[in-house]
Amino acid sequence: MTTTTAGAGLEPSRRTVGATTRPGLVLFMVCTAIFMLMLDATVVSAALADIRNDFDSSIDGLQWVIDAYALPLAGLLLTLGSAGDRFGRKRVFLSGMAVFTASSLALVLAGTILQLNVLRAVQGIGAAMLFATALPLLAVAYPESHARARAIGVYGAVMAGATVAGPVLGGALVTAFGWRSIFTINVPIGVLIFALALLRMPETARHLDRRTDWLGSVLLSGGLLSGVLGLTRGNALGWTSGTIIALGIASVLLLTLFMAWQFRSPHALFDVSMLRKPGFAGIAIIAVAHMATLMAASNYLAIFLINTMGFTPLQMGLRLVPISIAALVAAPLGAVLAKRVPTAVSLPLTMGLVVLGMWLLGNVESADAWTHFVPGMIVGGIGLGAITTVNQAAALTFASDANAGMASATFGTLRQVGMAIGVAGLGAMFSHSARAEAGRGLDLLAAHNVTVTPELRTQFLDGVAAGAGTDLAGAVPPEFASATPLLTETAHTASIEGLNALFTLGTVFGLAATLVAALAFAAEKWRASRR
């Protein structure tokens, strides 16, 4: 792994950057950009139900609304961080803002679910450019350590604030103006920040000797894309179909080649020496697991609250506030925990709270009100907020000072991997369980002298599997109007079955991840004792 010494490999004209620019203005531009891209990661939860209705989308299509945004962040974040070092972070920031803003405008005009998802991927590329350059830009604007710490504190608060605001702001916009408004709002803000950055943001030094590992990025992105595509299409094509098996093999092969290449590449995406430390594996497992469980599951809970419980998007957003507030309150407590409690204890403990939250969210019954979910949201939210801080602090213990930024980006990548895998895997479980329960319910309708045509059966099962909930019963043909109460009950029961199965899978996966991480930390402690 090559490192760049001060002044080495810098473009002469770029060694001194715009010191006259007020650092507060840079902080404003960076934080506004981060607020937008984090908001777009969470705001869509309020829009998924309306998107499904507008495009008559399957569960696969809805999964890709989220994963198409997360995958570029996972596959390109490290690469674009290196590109910013080499070509100039202002250039990459401006490019990212242009891509993000233009794709947001295009999303407003999307006419099909395929167009929407392709454009979400483009938007994710722009978000990756912004995310990769945000902290390095702040580091240059605030060279003094105490001022930098305060700026990064503001940056972290903005990220947390976007998470809190996402469901509520999204719900308000969707309720008042429709789902396209969640993307429209990005356009004027993006144009403003682009113009301001073009005129006032200083360029950073360019490390001309730093190369970008494009092959590593292609292998990583290809492996993740193959795996997520296999998970999202498994129910539709059959888990033993040749296509799904081929996608699984391709994913394993590409990710294996990626790891092998990282040991050989002269400009690897991350410091491979960290892989030799069991403690690194423990932190990585937690980074993936907390996103793949509660964070991913919250999107399906949002769909359930709208389509099955009948809330508007705004009402849904307000009912998800407990998880966001709990995370926001727990984040500073996590910083205290990170200083006073060893990582080997604090990370499994906080991940255990996430697992407990997942378990409390499950076991939903037909008569339960939305308040059933409040204890799970609070407990799980506390775990999420604490993990965010503890995980970041722990990650830096396995990297040198020169590679601290790389370590931070590595775990940012792992979190996006967790989100992509979780959305796909939990969605597949929901779809499978809801479809099976709905099928059993339709079979029982014969006892009530209701004969369901094959066409209606297919339409009904596809809708339930996509999370349409009780909205389906109101769209049946007139000749089945008398069966509407029975179909409503069937859709309701099937949706609850799917949601419970989703939470059960998340709980089991989270518990397994917690135990494996704890074993990895124990191995690291044993390894340290033998030195």
Image (tube, rainbow, N blue to C red):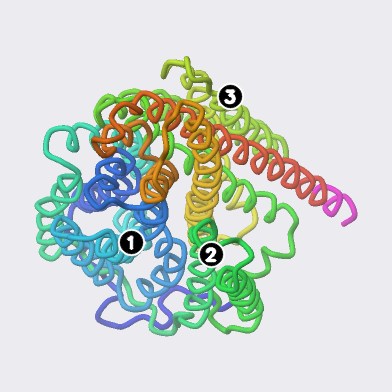
Q: Which residue is depicted at the point 54% across and 26% down?
A: 361
Q: Which residue is depicted at the point 41% across and 68% down?
A: 81
Return the residue at label 2: 230
Q: Quadrant of the N terminus?
A: bottom right
Return the residue at label 1: 124
Quarter of the rendering containing residue 47: top left
Contact flag, marks 2 and 3 (Cβ < 8 Å): no
Q: Nearer the viewer, mark 1 or mark 3?
A: 3
Q: Nearer the viewer, residue 82 or 464?
A: 464
| Mark 1 → mark 3, Cα distance in angstroms | 35 Å
| Mark 2 → mark 1, Cα distance in angstroms | 20 Å
What's drawn in magenta, residue-wise?
A: 525-531
Q: Position of residue 137 (x, y in %)?
A: 32, 59
Q: Is residue 299 left or right of residue 310?
A: right
Q: Is residue 352 left or right of residue 523?
A: left
**Quick one: label 1 or label 3, which is nearer the N terminus?**
1
Quarter of the rendering containing residue 401: bottom right
Q: Is residue 391 left or right of residue 35?
A: right
At numbered mark 2, what does the secondary structure look like: helix, strand or loop? helix
In reply to whether residue 320 is colored magenta, the answer given is: no
| Mark 2 → mark 3, Cα distance in angstroms | 28 Å
Return the residue at label 3: 363
Q: Farthest residue toward the right?
A: 530
Q: Position of residue 323 (x, y in %)?
A: 43, 28
From the viewer's perspective, is residue 220 above or below residue 501? Answer: below
User: Does residue 335 show up?
Assistant: no
Contact flag, marks 1 and 3 (Cβ < 8 Å): no
